[in-house]
Amino acid sequence: MRRLATVLAALLTVIAAASAATASAAVSSVAAPSVAAPRELRGMWIASVANIDWPSKAGLPAAQQKQEYLSLLDRAKALGVNAVFVQIRPTADAFYPSTLEPWSQYLSGTQGQDPGYDPLQFLVSEAHQRDLEFHAWFNPYRISLQGDVGKLVPTHPARLHPDWVVGYGGQLYYNPGIPAVRRFVEQVILDTARRYDLDGVHFDDYFYPYPVAGQQFPDQATFAQYGGGFGNVADWRRDNVNKLISELSTGIHRTKPWIAFGVSPFGIWRDARTDPSGSDTQGGVHDYDDLYADTRTWIRNRWVDYIAPQLYWPVGYTIADYGKLLPWWAHEVAGTGVSLYIGQAVYKIGTPSPAAWLDPSEMPRHIALNRATPGVNGDILYNTNTLLANPLGFADRLRTDLYAQPALIPVRPTVAGHAPLPPVLLPLWGNTLRWIGFATSYAVYQDGKLFTTLRGATLTLPEGRHSYAVTALDRTHHESRPSITEEYR
């Protein structure tokens, strides 16, 4: 590998010399370029469960499903988004051909029915063509939004293993306390990671289900069978989820070291009324006590590469103040190497309760606070349809102000990667900038500032006299030194 890198470097040097010798008189070279780019993840959740975002409804022809997705991506890219988090296993089903689980009903309208193409391959490929990072969003335990196992396709694993299934709150779940369930969920996710060119594997806030008033999650017999060594069911449930997270982390990074594994939990781990080290909040639900998701342990053990708490409350809100929760989470990740993104409730913009969401400046205020808080690496916006509907002008604000300048995705310290060799600019071809490089993507700088990122090695330049330089990025966003800078007029 070292010898290959040496050969490639020598080749690039030769090409650079040849390029400089043949450059047209309209081009002048600057030997010591200076370029700078902001680093910020700008993510967008695309939800498929119940056809929230995509596809818009079940049973659409494949061509229409594809066109809807392309429209979402193009509009997101125009806003400045640089990563998409797409739900591809919403209810123990699949948006891809699988020998383990049935086709999702949210595609064809009938669970188990082939939609006529491989959606996940299409989803990933089109995101990458636009240089958008693609995170595959899985729900680990949810089987169905309805409560009748008999309504599932006969080959569904829940039909084949009825002992794995529990009903709760009118829905069906895999029982997280059964070791075979954990192994199966891990198998499904690792199989998908092996077969597709994913940038990330993503969970949201669903682990043990949110509490339902007057109902107890029915795992008492499972605890009696598997809970030896635990003094109470709560510690055992947390251990079940911890095992899933830690084992998946190991498996994902062993399969493809560059894939980022991350979780977007409910925004309150515990509050200070319950634990002195918790947040200054009065929330009724806690990750630790109610969803059995001990996010602090995941961060401290670096089982996740990023954490994206859903801080779905306004600044100054008494029960859960965004301005207090943000620094609490930043403190949690400090010194761990785990990246911190913030889940933002775009779907609440313009709603009357609390009244702060009627203020067009509320969500921009969140982004400003993030940028002013050390250790915060960006945002993920929920949900896509609401965002693109431009509530209170927020999408316009992103496009013209908050995301007007492109940004590179920050390097994740826990994910393996290294800077590629710098690209070499070729002579201008008409008004097309060209280069040679060996990288996943490239950043093009205009007059020292980031102009765009792309996959490919050509770019049509706008009118006007500007200087350009190009850097190379590996798939984990490590950036090379810049090429020489060329000035075109």
Image (cartoon, rainbow, N blue to C red):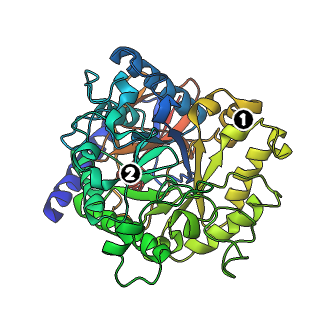
Measured from the top left, where is residue 163 in percent x and y?
28, 55
User: In which quadrant of the rendered view does residue 69 lie?
Assistant: top left
| In-image side of 350 versus 89 (left or right) | right
Mark identifier at residue 373: none
The location of residue 244, given as percent across then percent down, is 35, 65
For the N terminus, the quadrant is: bottom left
- What percent of the width, then of the height, locates residue 379? 59, 50
- For numbered disc 1, what is the local secondary structure? helix
Figure check: 309 above or below 44? below
**Where on the picture, by quarter, is residue 434?**
top left
- Work out whether 45 lies above or below 329: above
- Please name the amino acid that badge 1 sits on: Phe
Identify the image quadrant of residue 417: bottom left
Under mark 2, the amino acid is Gly
* Residue drawn at x 48%, y 68% as measured from the top left: 338
Residue indicated by mark 2? 200
Badge 1 crowding class, 10 Å Cα cut-off, few under 14, some 14 to 19, many 20 or more, is many
Q: Nearer the viewer, residue 100 or 204?
A: 100
**SS of the residue under disc 2:** strand
Q: Nearer the viewer, residue 34 or 188?
A: 188
Which residue is at a point 77% across and 37% down the rendered structure image? 351
Label 2 Cα crowd, 10 Å radius (few <14 / some 14-19 / many 20+): many
Task: Mark yes or no: residue 461 visible.
Answer: no
Which residue in the structure is indicated by mark 1?
Answer: 394
